[in-house]
Image: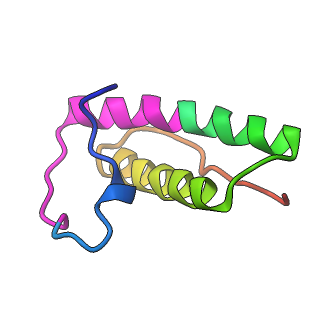
Amino acid sequence: MTHLFEASTCIGRDCENLNINHDEAIRWQERRKHIAVKIQQMKEMGFYNQNTLARELTDIRSAEKVMNDHNIAFERFELGGL
């Protein structure tokens, strides 16, 4: 997954006209799965960095938007209580 636009690196930059094709959307889906597992592990261990968590959640929500735009089924990631 080395070729993947990361929403968290786009804050404050002009990225609103970015076009993502279906293959890229599939990569977003895989990245979202990976990040969700990582966040769940951090939650179970009770150890997380707020900056990392914020970046990861931004990427998950961005992935969900991309997946929605490309009609890829998903369930919204819910963090729950920390």
Q: Is residue 73 left or right of residue 3?
A: right
Q: How many marks?
A: 0
Residue depicted at 55% across the width and 30% down the height: 34
Question: In which quarter of the view is residue 27 placed?
Answer: top left
- The percent coordinates of residue 51 (x first, y second) are 59, 61
Task: Work out which residue is located at the far top of the displayed protein and give it.
Answer: 1
| Colouring style | rainbow
In the picture, which quadrant includes the N terminus? top left
Quarter of the figure with residue 28: top left
The secondary structure making up most of the magenta span is helix
Pinpoint residue 43: horizontal percent, then vertical percent.
81, 45
If the image is split into quadrants, where does the C terminus sit?
bottom right
Residue drawn at (45%, 33%) of the image: 31
Report the residue at 65% width, 35% height from top: 38
As drawn, 36 above or below 1: below
Horizontal placement of 64 versus 22: left or right?
Answer: right
Outermost residue to the bottom: 12
Q: Within the magenta stretch, is there residue 40?
A: no
Question: Relative to 33, does residue 69 appear above or below in the rendering?
Answer: below
Which residue appears at 87% of the width and 46% of the height? Answer: 46
The magenta segment: 15-33
Viewer-proximal residue among 72 and 61: 61
| Residue 19 lies in the magenta-colored region | yes
| 58 left or right, relative to 82 | left
Q: Is residue 1 left or right of residue 16?
A: right
Viewer-side residue, 14 vs 26: 14
Residue 13: x percent and y percent? 21, 69
The location of residue 35, given as percent across then percent down, is 56, 38
